[in-house]
Image (cartoon, rainbow, N blue to C red):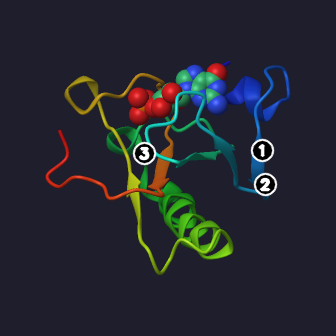
């Protein structure tokens, strides 16, 4: 099982902020902004570049959920960023797809 599958199975503790049939959202253990969540599909898709067309609705659901969580946390006016790291150059460290939701400070662009 991946680290995130073990969190989804409650084998490893995490602060769970949202859960539905397709995904879970947790606080990142090493936050890079005042708000830093991970939106994780329950299906252990490894990364975007290894997803299949049958998984398009899951990929869309992750983005939509990010927007809904941001609105619930009143982050939609100040702004927020959704990020997916795909592969080593992008900084991917956990091979189970996840969307980072970052907010609560002014974020640099372009990202480092
Ligand atoms: P990646 O670098 O793969 O895009 O993102 C992995 C993220 O998972 C990192 O931001 C890292 O801090 C977070 N992470 C790693 N291990 C754990 C953990 O055990 N619990 C939680 N909540 N986050 C973790």
Q: Which residue is mark 3?
A: 51
Q: Disc 2 or disc 3, which is closer to the eye?
A: 2
* Closer to the camera in the image, 64 or 50: 64
Q: Is residue 29 above or below residue 23?
A: above
Q: Are marks 2 and 1 in contact (CB under 8 Å)?
A: yes
**Which labelled disc corresponds to residue 46?**
none
- Of badges 2 and 1, the one in the foreground is 1
Name the residue at 36% across, 28% down: 92
Q: Residue at x 57, y 59 (%)?
A: 58
Q: Position of residue 90 (x, y in %)?
A: 25, 33
Looking at the image, tell me whether mark 2 or mark 3 is earlier in sequence order: 2
The kind of secondary structure element at disc 3 is: loop
Q: Look at the numbered disc 1 and say if its residue's Cβ is closer than 8 Å to ligand 1.
A: no
Task: State the separation of the CA atoms marked 3 and 1.
Answer: 25 Å
* Residue behind mark 1: 16
Above/below status of 4 relative to 34? above
Does 8 sit left or right of 44 as displayed?
right
Element carrying mark 2? strand
* Residue 2 appears in the rendering: no
10 Å neighbourhood of mark 1: few (<14), some, or many (≥20)?
some
Q: Secondary structure at mark 1?
A: strand
CA gap, disc 2 to disc 3?
A: 21 Å
Give me the residue at 48% from left, 49% from top: 99
Q: Which residue is mark 2?
A: 19
């Amino acid at each position: 099982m991946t680290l995130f599958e073990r969190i989804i199975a409650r084998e490893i503790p995490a602060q769970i902020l949202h859960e539905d049939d397709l995904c879970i959202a947790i606080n990142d253990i090493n936050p890079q902004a005042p708000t830093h969540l991970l939106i994780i599909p329950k299906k252990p898709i490894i990364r975007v570049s290894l997803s299949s067309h049958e998984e398009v609705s899951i990929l869309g659901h992750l983005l939509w959920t990010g927007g809904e969580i941001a609105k619930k946390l009143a982050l939609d006016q100040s702004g927020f960023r959704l990020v997916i790291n795909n592969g080593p150059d992008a900084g991917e460290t956990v091979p189970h797809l996840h969307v980072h939701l970052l907010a609560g400070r002014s974020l640099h662009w372009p990202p480092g």
